[in-house]
Amino acid sequence: MIRKLARSIREYKWTALLSPICMIGEVYMEVQIPLVLAKIVDLGVTAGDMGAVLKYGLILVLYAFISLGFGVASAFAGTYAATGFARNLRHDMFYRVQTFDFSNIDKFSTASIVTRLTSDVANIQMAFQMMIRMAIRCPMMLILATTNAYSISPRLCLTYCIALPLLAVGLFVLIRLVFPIFDRVFKTYDRLNNVVQENVHGIRVVKSFVREDRETEKFTSVSGDIYRDFVRAERIMSLNSPLMQLAVYSCILVISYLGATMVIQSGNNLAQGLTTGQLTSMFTYTGQILNSLMMVSMVIVMLTMSRAPMRRTAEILMETPDLAEPNNPVMEVKDGSIDFENVSFRYSAKANRNALESIDLHVAPGMTVGILGGTGSSKSTLVQLIPRLYDATTGTVRVGGVDVRDYDIETLRDAVSMVLQKNVLFSGTIKDNLRWGNPHATDEEMRHACMLACADDFVQSFPDGYDTHIEQGGTNVSGGQKQRLCIARALLKKPKILILDDSTSAVDTHTDAMIRKAFREEIPDTTKLIIAQRVSSIEDADLILVMDGGKIAASGTHEQLMKTSDIYREVYESQTKGGED
């Protein structure tokens, strides 16, 4: 996991290495300062030598400035490396998500992916910055300060040997208690983001049903869970400070008593024992040693908190697309013929049954195929196997006479235009959205596609025409307008296969008929698959499939199905309500 995340450091590795090197320099100069201070007291103040005070005072100032310089360099390098690492990590995660297939995306909720790209990466950034700075500073301070303290007085240094293990045990217990809470908090963040996303996405429904209070209660409930967990964790971690203060002042009391006794016994003689200046430096080292241990605990807590975000982020980076590219891919789709040969499909190996069962189908190039069926009859699942959004569990799907698994995925999907059941427009102008179908489309080509989709009239009615700005999600156009723009966008690809997944449900029957007429006259060589709920949308198709329970229950023309299929006849009669009679 760590190795996977570390790959995102890339060009910042030397900056990340510079930060701990500078930190070592800062710590080394800091632990020399108490020694210089001891000489000021012993050789200058006590001896009454102002020359020594001035000399060692200048040395102390020099050490302080050198330490400051190292500290600033370490902080700058650490911040630069951490922010760069976070940027690379977000880029790598987003790029990985773009390579996911539908089956991969199904494993992660949208809210979870957003949380991993934002909050989780922010926590990893903080942990990384602390790791290359504080995780180096604290152990080095412990080692160097303890070594210097031992060189002054091995006897007084024994005080640290007693205090440090006791303090370490206490900090370990606190961390063990806190970790499960932080692990739970990050999972709750997913729920919080999901509530917010769902509310904002469905705000029109919320307001139309006057359910603002209910949505506020849901948000307050999840937010309250996060609040309570953080309060519980902070209460436990608040014991860290009094525990630290107890250790520091206990050591100071012991060192004060023993040190004062040693100073009196030695008569403040450097050659005979402990001096006043050395005792002063021991107090400084006490603070440095125990404070560094407290910082070690904070580093451990931060790394503990970041363990869950690191695991969740690594899950994204280590997820591999289920649809593999072939070794020698076919780079051209010959025509729009479609063949299903004994195809069965299930969304997951854990699923209890197949979504599609034993599908056999042949569609010649240029045919118009209508697909009808009740909710959950796997109409959308059937067509999603054609551009290889999923792979068939068993059997073979062929396009242009070639197994879809043998195509270069980009080549295959460029030859198949699919207007999904849920129409999506992106923020930008109408032209920007249309050019998703063809980035190099001219204004004439865009207008022609819109005319085929019966979208040109309403686009021209806008003050800015094709330069009209579309809000995120297409909220400033109607459902029918959105559908027609999505159809025009698909037509700009000039595909060999066009799939409309219930994509005219929001337009009136007259407009629907106009669109189908344009398809027959303008793109006769394109194979068209139309999923519809209205029989009128598909009754003039060359072939109509009736789906039921993941199987093709019946197939044929409108006239044939009226005679042979009870399901089709019942749907037709329920929609016409005996109008023919």
Image (tube, rainbow, N blue to C red):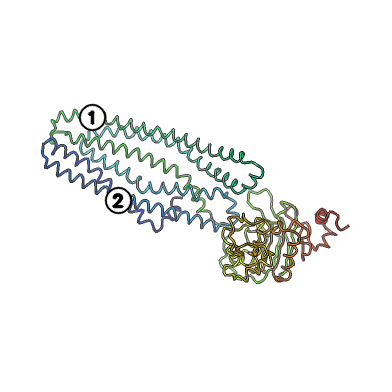
- What label sits on residue 139 in the rendered view? none
Residue 5 placed where, x, y %? 45, 52
Residue 255 placed where, x, y %? 24, 31
Q: Which residue is mark 2?
A: 22
The reply to whether discs 2 and 1 touch (Cβ–Cβ < 8 Å) is: no
Q: Which comes sooner in the sequence, label 2 or label 1?
A: 2
Furthest toward the right, the residue is 581
**So how many labels did they put on this image?**
2
Residue at (62, 48) in percent of width and height? 202
Q: Which residue is mark 1?
A: 256
Image side of residue 138 versus residue 257, left or right:
right
How far apart in space, not on screen, are marks 2 and 1 (Cα)?
A: 34 Å
- Determine whether the residue tagged by mark 1 lies in a helix, strand or loop: helix
Residue 387 placed where, x, y %? 64, 62
- Identity, as a three-letter code, of the amino acid under mark 2: Cys
- Whether residue 384 is visible, yes or no, is no
Residue 2 placed where, x, y %? 44, 50
